[in-house]
Image (cartoon, rainbow, N blue to C red):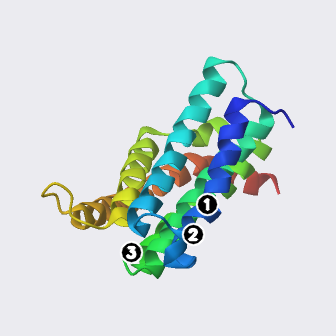
Amino acid sequence: MPLNIPILLTWLRIILIPLLIAIYYVPEAWVPVARDPAATVVFVVAAITDWLDGYLARRWQQTSAFGAFLDPVADKLMVAAALIMLVQLGRLDAILAAIIIGREITISALREWMAQIGAHRSVAVSMIGKIKTTAQMTAIPLLLYHAPLEGIDVPQAGTWLIYIAAVLTLWSMGYYMRMAWPHLIEEDRKR
């Protein structure tokens, strides 16, 4: 396993997941600041490491098979943990969390299968997937913060964005499935 700054940033993102959860489960006296802002900061730091590790790996030419495996796993774990916490806090409908988490599992499995048959480029990240990720990664900290800020209804903005992210989640899943469909049919014919 290579050890470099991009991979250390990915590991940091994984380490931040239990910290995000602990903020809401440890006694309140253990959290020196309000829980919601603390959880928001932890999630935003994790999200920044997501962008930064990929940028540095490409810039410094430190990409690796292990990093390519670990990065999306860290992303999925971070988002799933945050969504589950938001459901637990009553700030997100379970159906939206299930849609987003279910899509991530489905597309991860699809990408793995497509790589096995040598067609991984058919399910490369699309623009709709990037827009979905942006909406999702903006909505989650807004829902974690969950308080008005400078006259902005942060919870409402987060709610609207998570609904947009859920719609884009379904749309992008349909897109990836459509791209993979010819390969699925072809593989069935071979059997």
Is residue 101 visible in the rendered image? The answer is no
Look at mark 1 in the image and give the residue it sits on. Answer: 17
Which residue is drawn at the image coordinates 56% and 42% (left, top)?
A: 50
Which residue is drawn at the image coordinates 39% and 78% (left, top)?
A: 93
Type of the residue with mark 2:
Ile
Q: Alpha-carbon distance for marks 1 and 3? A: 18 Å
Look at mark 2 in the image and give the residue it sits on. Answer: 21
Mark 3 or mark 2, which is nearer to you? 2
Q: Do the residues labelled 2 and 1 touch (CB within 8 Å)?
A: yes
Percent x, y for residue 163?
Answer: 32, 65
Q: How crowded is mark 1: few (under 14 residues within 10 Å), some or many (20 or more)?
A: many
Q: Which of 183 and 86 is in front in this view?
A: 86
Which residue is drawn at the image coordinates 61% and 55% (left, top)?
A: 16
Q: Alpha-carbon distance for marks 2 and 1? A: 7 Å
Type of the residue with mark 3:
Leu
Q: Which of 88 and 188 is in front in this view?
A: 88
Q: Do the residues labelled 3 and 2 touch (CB within 8 Å)?
A: no
Q: In this view, does 180 lie above or below 158?
A: above
Q: Image quadrant for the C terminus?
A: bottom right
Looking at the image, the residue that sits furthest to the top is 60
Instruction: Determine whether the residue tagged by mark 1 lies in a helix, strand or loop.
Output: helix
Percent x, y for residue 137?
Answer: 42, 52
Q: How crowded is mark 3: few (under 14 residues within 10 Å), some or many (20 or more)?
A: many
Look at mark 3 in the image and give the residue it sits on. Answer: 92
